[in-house]
Amino acid sequence: MFGATGAAALYLADNAWFGAGDLWAMLFWSVPFGVLLAIVIGPLSRRLAAAATLWRYGALVPLAGVLGYLWTVIVALVLGGWIGAFSFPVLFCWVAGGLLGGVVAAWSGRPRSWPAALVLGATIALALGQLNAHARAPQPRMRVIVTPGATAAEVQRVWTEVLGRPTGPSGAHDLLPGISSVSASGYEGESAVLTVSFWKSTSKRQRDSLVALIRRSPLVARVDSVTPEDTSGVRPSVSY
């Protein structure tokens, strides 16, 4: 419970405390997670009281991490899309909190194993920092410049037929696989500009393939990449 909430607090501290109000919700959902850890890890720790130190750490730490992942899935099923409203990566926080809980449980039965507990704790903290940096980094983006003088209907076609595929009447469409979002970004001269964001899991090969496909459209004048350093128009958010 405290490990998960602490991980969220560290993320917020490194992000100028943007979304600090979400900590109360994190604490609320972390309390039953702490109870779950106690119910599962506590009895197992007592069963392994006579086991070798390596077996204790090898059993308790991974299991606690898996429980953190499963708890994230449970909360996601309860909250639905609202889980994306958290201002920090709850998946990383609950998994890290579970792993740290497993380390504490393994160490509590073997106080002399504190060097191993310290190394594992530091490793988890370092990994959490790297994962949080990944979650905070902007998604790969590109700017799609529509042909000059394109009508509003033609710009809409870029949304629905070039960057997406129609799925029904009245302009309903899905974005191409690999694209997470599209937003209007004003005009460049007489050309409408659309900013396209890719999922971080989209490989460079797939992104290059999508860019080549988009460039072939007669409605597209140019496609420019956006450097990660360019954070204009980027709202602080969490993405995996």
Image (cartoon, rainbow, N blue to C red):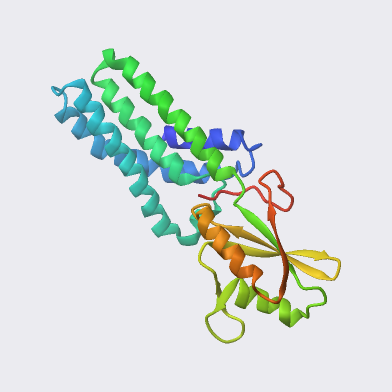
Q: Locate residue 33, reporting x and y percent.
A: 36, 42
Above or below for 51 versus 174: above
Residue 125: x %, y % from top left: 45, 29
Considering every residue shown, the one lying at the far right of the view is 189
- In the visual, does 145 lie left or right of 59? right
Q: From the image, which quarter does the N terminus lie in?
A: top left
When asked about the image quadrant of residue 40, the answer is top left
Q: Name the residue: 82% across, 77% down.
A: 149
Left or right? Give the position of 68 relative to 130.
Answer: left
Figure check: 207 above or below 71: below
Above or below, 160 relative to 226: below
> Residue at the spot x=60%, y=33% of the render?
13
Q: Which image quadrant is residue 109 in?
A: top left
| Residue visible at 61% across and 44% down in the picture | 19
Give 57 or 29, whichever is nearer the viewer: 57
Residue 60 lies, in percent from the top left, at 25, 32
Asked if residue 47 lies left or right of residue 237, the reply is left
What number of labels is visible? 0
Residue 98's image quarter? Answer: top left
> 183 or 20, which lies in front?
183
Image location of residue 116, percent across then percent down = 32, 19
Q: Residue at x 27, y 25 (%)?
A: 106
Residue reaching furthest to the top:
112
State the residue in front, 70 or 132: 132
Q: Is residue 42 left or right of residue 97?
A: left
